[in-house]
Amino acid sequence: MTLTAVIFTIFALLGLWGALVVLFAKRPVYNALGLLLNFVSLAAMYIMLNAPFLGVIQIIVYSGAIVVFFLFVIMILNLRDPLTDMDLSFKGLAAFIMMIATLSLLGVYLYVIKLPSWKLGPEGSPARLGELLLTDYLIPFELASLLLLVAIVIAVVIGKKGEEQ
């Protein structure tokens, strides 16, 4: 098994772990952070599959904008526990170590292995991606945005019903 396959497997497992946190965490902020881990792992896998534009867009749009938007909705709906003292528990320390390890692994992979050999083919170019999104995949692209909008509206309605009681 090559080093690239091992690193790809690690990112795949981290993405799976983030998805499981989204599904099973009890606190909404942890769900959003699990989603962030999933998105960053997916971006790393895109980069490893020689699609650096998709990887960067994954980080900017999803990891940046969408997760921040979800955290903003969580704050508006006040779905958090009351503030307590800083908790330096084992879980917090393990999460911090995993984050540092993930970012270090991605940095080493990009700097040592991938950056010198990046060559975009015609399928990985931004022009081709834009062409595909606005022709062949226009309906799924628009349905995904509509699905996100409906989910946010439903979350706000559910949150407002909880305040009225």
Image (cartoon, rainbow, N blue to C red):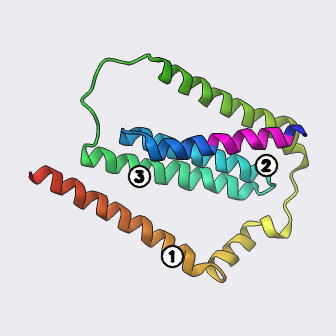
In the picture, measured across the screen, residue 133 lies left or right of residue 116, that is left
SS at circle 1: helix
In the picture, measured across the screen, residue 141 lies left or right of residue 101, that is left
Question: Where is residue 32 drawn, in percent x and y?
Answer: 45, 44
Identify the residue shown where x is 44% and y is 48%: 68
In this rendering, the answer to whether 130 lies above or below 23 is below
**Which residues lie in the magenta part?**
4-14
Residue occupied by mark 1: 142
Question: Where is residue 139 drawn, in percent x and y?
Answer: 55, 81
Identify which amino acid the numbered label 3 is placed on.
Phe
SS at circle 2: helix
Q: Residues within 10 Å of mark 2 (few under 14, many from 20)?
A: many
Of labels 2 and 3, earlier in sequence is 2
Q: Residues within 10 Å of mark 3 (few under 14, many from 20)?
A: some
Residue occupied by mark 3: 69
Q: Would you say the residues marked 1 and 3 are in contact, meaning their CB atoms lie under 8 Å apart?
A: no
Residue occupied by mark 2: 48
Identify the residue shown where x is 75% and y is 42%: 9
Cα separation, mark 1 vs mark 2, equals 27 Å
